[in-house]
Amino acid sequence: QLQLVESGGGLVQPGGSLRLSCAASGFTSDYYAIGWFRQAPGKEREGVSCIRSSGGSAKYADSVKGRFAISRDNAKNTVYLQMNSLQPEDTAVYYCAAVPLECRAPISDYSGIKYWGKGTLVTVSS
C-alpha cells in the first residue's frame, strides 16, 4: 500500500523558514516523481514543486522560485521542501503526491494522480 506522510508544517512569521518532509512507503520510488502541491482556503490546488525519481533538476512554480528548494533522499524514501522567505500568501495546506514517471508540465496538473498525503498546514502570520 503506497503511503505518503507529510510533516513539518506550522506557524511562522513572514520572512521565516520551514522545512516540510514527505515520507513515502509501499512503492518503488524509481517509477514516481514526487510533487508538492498546496491549497489555500477558497483557492484551487496548485503545484509548488516537483522532483524526478532520480533527483537532479526540479520544477518550481514561478511564485516560489528562488525561495523554495526541493530535494530527495531515496535512501530514506523522503522528499523535502525547504521554504525560505515565507509570506502570508504561502499560507496553505501542503500536500505531497506521487506523480507517475515524470513531473508534469505545468506542475499544477494533478489529473490522474492517485496517491496523496493528508497534508500539513503552513500558516505565515505575524
Image: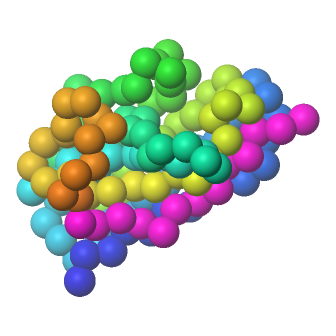
Q: For this view, does 4 lie left or right of residue 57?
A: right
Which residue is more in the foreground, 58 or 118? 118
Q: Is residue 56 visible?
A: no
Q: Residue at x 90, y 35 (%)?
A: 126
Q: Residue at x 71, y 27 (%)?
A: 87
Query: Measured along the vertical axis of the image, is residue 119 above or below residue 46?
Result: below
Which residue is more in the foreground, 58 or 73? 58
Whether residue 46 appears in magenta in the rendering, the answer is: no
Q: Is residue 120 visible?
A: yes
Q: Residue furthest right?
A: 126
Q: Residue at x 74, y 32 (%)?
A: 88
Quadrant of image for the N terminus? bottom left
Query: Measured along the vertical axis of the image, is residue 24 above or below residue 97?
Result: below
x and y, in percent, of residue 77 in the image: 30, 61
x and y, in percent, of residue 105 in the image: 20, 30
Q: For this view, does 53 lie left or right of residue 44?
A: left
Which stretch did the figure color magenta?
A: 114-126
Query: Measured along the vertical axis of the image, is residue 115 above or below residue 64?
Result: below
x and y, in percent, of residue 114 in the image: 23, 66
Q: Residue furthest front?
A: 42
Whether residue 115 appears in magenta in the rendering, the answer is: yes
Q: Quadrant of residue 3?
A: bottom left
x and y, in percent, of residue 120 in the image: 58, 59
**How many numbered callouts?**
0
| Colouring mode (rainbow / by chain / secondary structure / one colour) | rainbow
Q: Residue at x 13, y 66 (%)?
A: 28
